[in-house]
Image (cartoon, helix red, strand yellow):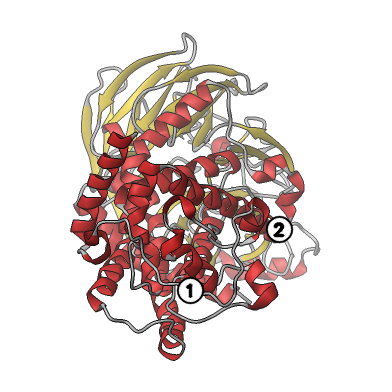
Amino acid sequence: MLDPLIRLWVDVSGAVFEGAVQPALYAAGLMMWADDVQEWLDFALLGIVQIVLVYAVCRPLEAVRPVEPVSNRAAVLTDVFYTLLARLGLLPLIAFVLLSSAERMLNGWLADAGFVPPTLETLIPALREMPLLALLLYVLILDFGEYWRHRFQHMFGWWYALHSVHHAQRQMTFWTDDRNHLLDDAIAAVWFGAVALLIGVPPAQFVLIVMLRQLAESLSHANVRLSFGRVGERLLVSPRFHRIHHGELSAGEDGRNYAVLLPVWDWIFGTADFDRKSYPRTGDPNAPESLATGGWLRQQIDGFRELGRALRRR
Amino acid sequence: MRLRPLMIALALLAPAGARADLVYVLNSGEASVSVLDAATREETRRIPVLREPHHLVLTPDGSELVIADSGGNELLFVAPTTGEVLRRVRISNPYHLEFSPDGRFLAVASLRRDQVDLYDAATLELLQRFRPGDMPSHIAFTPDSKRFFVTLQGDRSVAAFDTETRTQLWTAEVGKDPAGIIWHRGRLIVGIMGADHFVTLDPETREVRPAFTLGRGAHTIFPSPDGRALYATSRVDSRLAEVDPETLQVRRVWNVPGGPDCLTFDPEGRIWMTLRWSGRVAVLDPARPDAQPAFETVRVGRSPHGIFFKPRREGVGGDFAQAMPGAVSGTRPLSAPVPPRTVPAAPLPGGATPAAARPAP
């Protein structure tokens, strides 16, 4: 059933790469990265699809059942800029360039130490014949890793200083998901890379996993009065569930509902709040005003300042 | 061409049930290996691998096909006649690999750990690890197996290694982003991917000379099994060139959209090439005078890279390309010429086998 779609995708991305991206790489003297950039192109093209899909789903929901009226359109526009940067693959591309040499060096050290990074399929050979189950396990493990990264973002003061860029938004919409400090994004990439090193992540599945996760995250940030019901709230992070996490009283170390995709982690580790009637005001009262209403560059600079203050307080 | 009606008539009279030749295609962007029926051009099977298979090579005795899954950190040993996965060996990030012509060594280049490993081919014991520089890419041995060479994509150079002393001998700058490399009549020919041409490198003097110009993204080069032509690809301008092995003059150029990359040959001399960006394999018969654009394409998986033609007709081994008369070039050259012989014909569509085919030129 998916074959025609996959073939269409291969044809479109191949044509874009061959017709535009590869000639540009050649002109820029970057042909040595051609194979890697081909993978990156998936993120960029899927990012466009994601933005269209998310807009088509979330915008009508926000219009029909908003939690609050949109009173600060400038703050939303800043989030739109964050989204374009992240989902069109620009940030992943920068991270790739910065981390590529380090990754090759690390791989060399590991090989010298006699360590061959495993994959889930080498640890559980039966998974070689069950790709769907393997995909579900990858989602589960990666989501578990994301839950703990998110908890650490709130647990350590210096890390929350960066993460407060995300939490300072008082006008939360589906665009807010990618509102992150660059350094926070870089740490997230290293974190994810470490998990990937431990279990291995298949490239095709990786793209799919990231896409599903980002779609769910966009919806969970939407300004919409939507709960998934008594059972659904425990299966998938809903806009209501995540709004509690963004509530003013949930900023910093007092956080609740850290899960990114699957609320089961909050359930297991005692951080869940399943109050299905609650749609609190969002924002971080302790964050500088610029983190809430400043432009992208101002927020990046002030994020670093907050980080410096947090480190000096230690 | 005049033989074709006769061959078809003979095919109709021949006994059915002959096994079709196979073509193995590594889908580097889809974690799988496509197995094609060479006669019908249809994919008959897809072998799942872990992550990212790029290159493959036949073992010196022709009994196993070794597939390097770089992202999956595995070598897969496959029975080339059946496609059965015989065993898997854990090796960190194997990208390109090559056996020495005498069968003693296996060299593995790792693009993502900046290392080149030399293994005992029989036991796969690691004999030596080299750290020659940035992004080791493709490998070529000398016919006497005493030396091998690796392109370093990130360092604009080629590194030389000695298999006996297990040392790195030298590094020579050849041009921006060097990729494919072969040993050819006492010299090396290297594709300069960051430019539009190939160069020759004299391994004794390390003198680098322009060889021929093909098009932007000059990439790989392969000798035809009969040694009468070299075939080179460029990935940005998507071209395939036939090159005179004596003069290195370009004889013909075909435009093959889709990013032609690796090649393999069938015993009839047809060229099977992977098209990286279009997810297809192209089949081109250079014997046809009207060969532009007379090539057919076969849909495979995403980003197809390495490719290998496995004849299954009687009397032709998987290593026929190395055993053809004149096969004195290539990444696995023979140390001594072999006597000429006639190549049995391929089965035709429908499973029948023609009684005769044209002899190797």
**Image coords of residue A80 (percent x, y):** 30, 71
**Image coords of residue A208 (percent x, y):** 53, 63
Which chain does the residue under circle 1 lie in? A
Asked whether residue B290 appears in the rendered view, the answer is no
Residue at horizontal 72 percent and vertical 61 percent from the top? B353
Instruction: Please identify the quarter of the rendering in which residue A89 is found.
Output: bottom left
Identify the residue under disc 1: A219
Residue at horizontal 29 percent and vertical 60 percent from the top? A21
Please name which of the two marks, 2 or 1, marks the residue nearer to the observer.
1
Residue furthest bottom as drawn: A64
Identify the residue under disc 2: A133
Name the disc covering residue B321, or none.
Answer: none
Q: Nearer the viewer, residue A48 or A165?
A: A165
Name the amino acid type tagged 2. Leu
Q: Is residue B163 placed above or below B30 in the rendered structure? A: above
Give the total of numbered labels: 2
Q: CA distance from mark 2 to mark 1?
A: 25 Å
Where disc 2 sits, the SS reads helix
